[in-house]
Amino acid sequence: MQTRASERLRTLLETGIAISSELSLDPVLERIVEAAAHLTGARYAALGVIDRTGMGLERFITTGIDVETRTTIGDEPHGRGILGVLIRDAAPLRLHDIREDPRSVGFPPGHPPMQTFLGVPILLRGVAYGNLYLTEKTDATDFTEEDEEVVSLLAAQAAVAIENARLYESATEWSRQLESLNEIGNALVTELDLSRLLDLVARRLRELIDARVVAIALPLGRDLRIEAAAGDGSAELTGATLERGQSKAGRVLDRRRSERVDSLLDDPEVHVSVTRVLGARSGLYVPLLVRDEAIGVVIAHDKLGRDVRFGDADMRLVEQFAARAAIAVDLSRRVAHDSLRRVVAGQELERKRLARELHDETGQALTSILLGLKAVEGAESAEATRRATADLRALVVATLQDVRRLAVELRPKTLDDFGLVAALERLAETFTEATGIDVDLEARLGDGRLPGEVETTLYRIVQEALTNVVKHAEARSVSILVVRRHATATAVIEDDGRGFDAAATREDGLGLLGMNERAALLGGRVTVESAESGGTTIAAEVPLT
């Protein structure tokens, strides 16, 4: 007897040390179940962890039942019958024959026969974390008061271990949440593409709330369009539209209030077609709010696990992410609006310039031609006619050159047909002819052409730089170097004219803002070096991938 007591004490101590050093919950539960079976001589033992609702079991760990038998039994118990008695009434329970108790609901097919039973609650500070269940002592006797006492001691250790493991899991979960929130915050600053940012939010959110699928929908006219989705069926969901007035997401958007639906089939606002297509059973809907204006909605369906319902903590977490996603959508719209405004303003400025040149130069030249034709008609001699005709021919040639120059400025055909180097050679030639300023062009791009958008960007930057030389520099010569280095292409334009204070000069006054925006669209940059003592260097670097 003394030996048996010493063995039990040693087992309790060893188990206590082992489970207190383990932070992962499942290994803790397995160790506790094995120790309980060993301490009482039970053939079968199990530990059920009570779920967050306090009404059922979220985990059920067993020992003594082989894999084949467990497969035959099927689903794990949900906490009915005798197991439910212990959940509702957290007090030890010993039975001589579990089958004779009126509260028993029997066993499923394939379940091994069980008669004697001992159940002990796992309690800490009055909070029930679960229960230990033991059946069928190997010596075919009933469980004793001593068995109950020793299992109660083990259950007390188990409660501390479970609480520690849950605290550790909670801390780890908070760490994951903070990392994800930090990642989203960084992306808000650096990511310009809205679809990629929303996709990141959807993926991270799905991981954090353990949802089967998460989607983000934005208004599109009278509908909602799913802009990003992560999880089951995300490929089919992305790009799909929902009727704003006939969908749960649309109504949540209009009410500007988060809603949780435990059963989609029981909510009259949820269309049956939605649940049928997605196979969804529960839902979480959180609006994206900016200054109390609803600009989108986050949709989540089906928490992974036995219980598909989302909890209050899930809703709070989604609301935190929704606040950041709302900022991203609003910022993207503002940037897009500002970019569009700049594009329109730039187009209008270019149209004004072309209109002015057509009016002042081409228009006047055509008027002169018209007057010259009248002079030819009224010429009194062949010599006068010859001179008038020669003057008209020269004027027509000059006008044709002006029209061709304007066409080249709008879109040089050489750039499309022969590439950047040929287009720059033609630009340099016409620039020198028109201004008398020497241009030295050197190109080291190697074999093959650059990507089309890179060629266009570098051409326009060089073109704008030459325009600045004419307007502001009073230069005698300009050098242009275009070179390919590894994964970038660089254009350097340098003049020997009058410089300026780069720090004090407004960028838009010299077209530098437009150059920067062109380069930035491709992930590149433009740098300017100049001084009032003379000379300006503009370098544009654009990645090739």
Image (cartoon, rainbow, N blue to C red):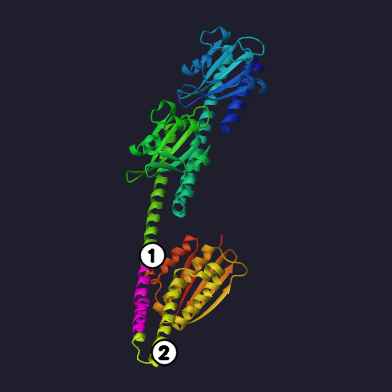
Q: Establish if 350 lies above or below 268.
A: below
In terms of depth relative to the viewer, which is nearer, 159 or 331?
A: 331
Report the residue at 40% width, 35% height from top.
Answer: 247
Q: Establish if 118 lies above or below 351.
A: above
The N terminus, quarter of image: top right
Q: Horizontal placement of 262 versus 119: left or right? A: left
* Disc number for residue 347: 1
Q: Magenta residues, as a range?
A: 350-374
Q: Please state which amino acid type lies under the numbered disc 1.
A: Gln
Which element type, helix, strand or loop, lies under badge 2?
Answer: helix
Q: Establish if 395 lies above or below 454.
A: below
Which element type, helix, strand or loop, lies under badge 1?
Answer: helix
Where residue 410 appears, as percent x and y from the top left, is: 44, 69
Question: In the rendered image, which residue does mark 2 sit on?
Answer: 386
Local packing at callout 1 (Cα closer than 10 Å; few below 14, some 14-19, many 20+) is few
The C terminus, quarter of image: bottom right
Where residue 423 appears, as percent x and y from the top left, is: 52, 72
Q: Please state which amino acid type lies under the numbered disc 2.
A: Arg
In terms of depth relative to the viewer, which is nearer, 322 or 452?
A: 452
Find out whether the residues at labels 2 and 1 contact each other: C-beta distance under 8 Å: no
In terms of depth relative to the viewer, which is nearer, 177 or 365?
A: 365
How much space separates mark 2 and mark 1, taking CA atoms? 44 Å
Q: Residue furthest top?
A: 100
Q: Earlier in the sequence, mark 2 or mark 1?
A: 1
Magenta-drawn stretch, dominant element (helix, strand or loop): helix
- In magenta stretch: residue 160: no
Residue 456 visible to an observer of this rendering: yes
Q: Establish if 237 lies above or below 68.
A: below
Residue 504 visible to an observer of this rendering: no
Report the residue at 37% width, 55% height from top.
Answer: 337
Where residue 527 appears, as percent x and y from the top left, is: 47, 69
Q: Nearer the viewer, mark 2 or mark 1?
A: 2
